[in-house]
Image: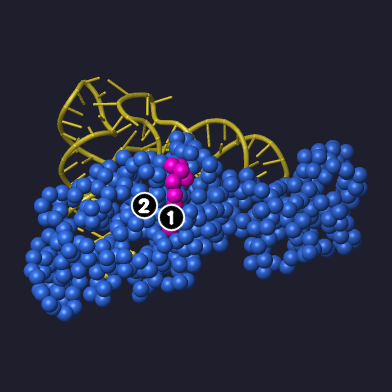
Chain colours: A blue, B yellow
Amino acid sequence: MSEKPVVTRFAPSPTGSLHIGGGRTALFNWLYARHTGGKFLLRIEDTDRERSTEANVQIIHDGLTWLGLVPDEPPVSQYARAERHREAVQQMLDQGRAYRCYLTVEELEAEREIARAQGRAIRSPWRDKEKTGSNLAHVIRFKGPIEGDTVVNDLIKGPVTWANKELDDLVLLRSNGDPTYNLAVVVDDHDMGVTHVIRGDDHLNNAARQSLLYQAMGWEVPEFAHLPLIHGPDGAKLSKRHGAQAVGEFAEMGYLPEGMRNYLARLGWGHGDDEVFSDEQAIAWFDVKDVVKAPARLDWAKLNHINNQHLRKADDGRLAGLTREALEKQGEQLTADVDDRLRRVVGLVKESAATIQELAGLSLFSIRERPLKLDEKSLGLLNEETRERLSRLASHLQSQADWAPEALLIALKSFAEIEGVGLGKFGPALRGVLSGGAAAPDLASALAALGKEEALGRLADALCSAQ
RNA sequence: GGUCCCUUCGUCUAUCGGUUAGGACGCUAGAUUUUCAUUCUAGAAAGGGGAGUUCGAUUCUCCCAGGGACUGCCA
């Protein structure tokens, strides 16, 4: 249908935080734009002056930036375009496609009640009446067709049909002259050259009225694609009690943006059996028409799994930096050489971490300063026999040149062989000495993460202090 | 109440009339193992209900049920 380059947009309203569902909507718009070589735009729907705040606009920008979904052009403020919206209304007024409605709030309410009781759409009596020269407060309504049907060919849902008589005449301009959402979206999407309106399912009903508006203005109707919403694990609308709902919260919890993108893309869209994929792959594979029709539930376990997979692939230097930030936020005391230490440990423990927060927890043992304070359990493992064995192990390791995990494992095993015992005979004690009792990876990795000097130092500390 | 949307393992999904209904997460069992984890192997687990079309329906049509959205001078 469209030979023109694709233009998509994300159009959140700054009346709250950036919801994870909104994040996914942005992601799908972004993916589709990238897939088609088109443009991805951002428009802030701030026509609700009561509830829109600058702080929320900032939250949207922060969230999108974190997710890596940066628009290709500067964001558009919908409210700033109010003059243009009024212009469009004037055109419809001139062409008899809109009318002034003088219904008071009370009258409207009464009418609404009647209409609802009769199971029909509300109709203003002013639709076919003209009140010339009146200064009375009034809104401007769209004069929609009463006969026939309106069909929206949704890219995801397929053709959806409404009887025009079911569609009420929506308000275009409020009594204070401010444009309403439904009018503003249409005018803005047209002016911004949006070819594909990809948004939440909750707007499906609006799509009918909006296509009528496009037609009244003599504009080409864009393609519509309505994404099913994201629900909580229990199937109910996602809310705070499900753990998190704002994009910022997921960032705080230590999920990686690429992991988030992967998981979100996978929620409601799939490409065969592929579960873990890169942005490049997602871009190459994505098409709105493949989006699933049914709403999906947020699954923390799977999110963790996907994120873990991306953690494994991530650059260790970057992870070290992120881990450091997390530790700082937790109020951990950081030594001067913390970056070096993290750089060494992060790659060795990341496979068992789902988030940066967990990575921080698993790395903690390595950034403690000597001498370590051993916990009860570790102390208890240091009996006479073990102490002597560890002392022999220390000298065994002293001559160890290759301090990589693989080599260390071999060294550990050969030592056990020399001693004529299994690793289990001294492993737990060594672990305690190296970590103080904190979480730590396997022995070889722990030794490697600490580095030869630190590891042997900790060993020496424990052996002499307990003497 | 009305309009519209949705319905495959617990969850995310594959299937595009013919399959032992596949994969992933999670779960269970076993193996590996110095703890936890990782890794490996195996296993349990699904087409909401009812009609119809068809040689044959998860797949097409209709009805019902359940869930959801909208029904604002919010977006």
Where, by quadrant of the figure, is residue A169 drawn?
bottom left
Label 1 marks which chain's residue? A
Residue sitting farthest toward the bottom: A135
Q: Is residue A7 left or right of residue A433?
A: left
Q: Is residue A135 left or right of residue A42?
A: left
Q: Quadrant of the N terminus of chain A?
A: top left
Q: Residue at x 26, y 52 (%)?
A: A219
Q: Is residue A267 visible?
A: no
**Circle 1 is placed at which residue position?**
A41
Labels 1 & 2 near each other (Cβ < 8 A): yes
Q: Is residue A288 above or below residue A74?
A: above
Instruction: Give the mark nearest the N terminus, 1 or 2.
Output: 1
Magenta range is: A34-42
Q: Give the image location of residue A320, x and y in percent.
A: 69, 55
Amino acid type, residue under disc 1 in the picture: Leu
Q: Is residue A34 above or below residue A238?
A: above
Question: What is the C-alpha distance between the residues marked 1 and 2?
Answer: 9 Å
**Circle 2 is placed at which residue position?**
A194
